[in-house]
Structure formats: C-alpha cells, structure tokens
Image: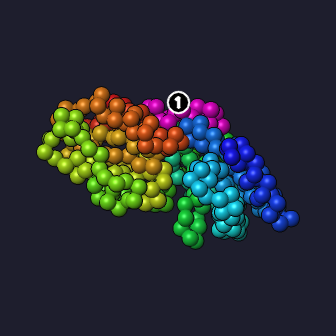
Amino acid sequence: MNYESFVDYIFKNVENKLTEDCKVTLEKVTKNNGKILDAIVIAKNDVCIAPTIYLNHLYHNYLEGFSLESIVESIFNIYNENSDGARYETGFITNYDLAKERLVLKLINYEQNKKLLETVPHMQYLDLAIVFSYVFENPEREFSSILINDSLLSNWNVSKEDLYKQALINSPNILPHTYSSLLSTIKKMDTFDELPEFEEDECIIPDPSADCGQCMFVLTNTARINGAACIFYKGLLNEISNMHKTDLIIIPSSIHEVIIIPKIGELKRDFINKMIQDVNVTHLKDEDVLSDHAYLYSHSRRKIESI
C-alpha cells in the first residue's frame, strides 16, 4: 500500500470508529524548517484544543510490519491519553495575564523558516530566529506546547519585545538548563550506540591525547525539547565560559541541544562546519536541524558570533 492509500485508509477507519460528539480532520501541518507533515486531528465538539497525530512516522511503522488495525488502535490510544480538554487551561488564548507565566524561548533557523516567520512574532539573531511557545502545565509532566503566532499576539495586545522579556525570565524556571559532558550524556541515552570516532589529525579538540567525549559538553534543558534556546538564558554562556576560562565553540547539533567545546588553540572552522553539515544530512530529521555552521561565544565581548 502506498502512502496516499495508507492515509486514506487510516482516516476513514478512524472516522468510522468515532462517537457522534467527535470529529476528525486531516490536516497539513508545517513544522520547523518548512517540513510539512500529514496529521489527523480528533476533537470533541466542545473542546478547542485537540491532540495532533502525525501519520508520516506511522506509515514507516506500517512498512516495518505493523498491521493497519494496530496503527488505528494506536491512534485511539494517543487520542484517549490526550483528549481530556479539561487538563488544558485555555483562558490564555485571550488573556495575556494567564499566558505570560508559561511563555518560553524556542530557537530556529531564520532562513529556513521565512514563510513561518511571516505570521509568527520573532527576534532575529545572526541567522537564527528566537520564537516563543506557550508550555502547558500538565499533571503528568509531559511536554506540550503551542507556538505563539500573530493572532495570539493580537489577542493579547502586547509587543514581541514584551514576549521576549517575559520568556527570557520564564525559560530558566520552566525549562532549567542541564550541562554535562558528551560522554556522560550518551551513556544515559539509548539512541546513541557509541561516540563518533575522529582521526587524530581531524579531532576538533586541540590536544589529540584528550578524550573528545570528555572535552565536549551538551547544553540543553531538562525536557530535552527545544533546548538549543538555552544559549540565550541570561548569563549562562558567560558562566560556562568563566568555568572553562576561555571562549566557547557552539555546535548547533539540533534545535533540542547544542554541543559546547572550550576553545583551546587553533579553531578548525572548516572541519567543524563540514561535520555539522554531514550530521544534519545523515542523522537529523529535517525539522530538527538548527544551523549548518558553528558559532563562537566570545568571553571578552560576551556575545555569540558566527564562525
């Protein structure tokens, strides 16, 4: 079964199983970097917030041998786990006083999201864009958020500068940063089997005898979602730079985290940027890519610069 037939089958079977107080729609959702995904949205008639269930990865499950019936069942499981609209306070949609305490920063690529940014309040920094999300406060501590668009901004009658100031205050409290060696981070994660191997003359750590995994550090947040925005937490990079007593090379490994390398000796710019570009193509989903080159945090100037 091809993808189009799969989508049609899933939609019809979900629709047939719904109760009368629910409706299902099939939508094209634009994600980060212009990535467009197909999604089923199941909503009760009296609820304005509903779970979005993406079909693209479910098709991969089908190709790997999952039955169509089990996929339909998984969609209803996702819906049932997330359909209780009472869990989500919706007053924030029209009331900024209810929204402002839950606003956080998100960092994306400016050029790859120009279309999206036409309708989303943002602050440009170099070739990056700071946008804003509202994070729901869920009892189960799962991470749910929505991107703030111009429509919400208009409802609130505030400026993007107001959003930035508020999100800058909230982000470290709602999504505290974590900072640990790459080696220790990888040991805690099932998604990586081993550290990347470097030839001695290509290692981005100036001292070839050093352990690359111990000299590289992962900066993200406790949710490990949209953690690259931590580089804009007030005073954080300066604190890290003081700790290492040097400038910092910032590797934009994804929108969810960055890798920090204390700058010691010559900066191998071309190698670092090629490594980033290769990883973007071979290891990341399109929507998770942040940038194709490294950045430098200057300890003396206290600012992030392009490399």
Q: Nearer the viewer, residue 169 or 296?
A: 296
Q: Is residue 88 visible?
A: no
- Residue with the most extreme bottom position: 139
Q: Nearer the viewer, residue 143 or 135?
A: 143
94 horizontally vs 202: left or right = right
Q: Quadrant of residue 17?
A: bottom right
User: How many marks do you count on the picture?
Assistant: 1
- Residue 82 coordinates in the image, percent (x, y): 66, 65
Q: Nearer the viewer, residue 206 or 138?
A: 206
282 horizontally vs 260: left or right = right
| Image quarter hosting the C terminus | top left
Residue positioned 66% across, 63% down in the render:
70
163 horizontally vs 87: left or right = left
- Residue 196 coordinates in the image, percent (x, y): 30, 46
Q: Which residue is mark 1?
A: 111
Q: Quadrant of residue 88?
A: bottom right
Q: Secondary structure at mark 1?
A: helix
- Residue 101 coordinates in the image, percent (x, y): 56, 59
- Magenta-tinted stretch: 109-128
Amino acid under disc 1: Glu
Q: Nearer the viewer, residue 288 or 94?
A: 288
Packing grade of label 1 (10 A; few <14, some 14-19, many >=20) is: few
Residue positioned 67% across, 54% down in the render:
52
Q: Quadrant of residue 138?
A: bottom right
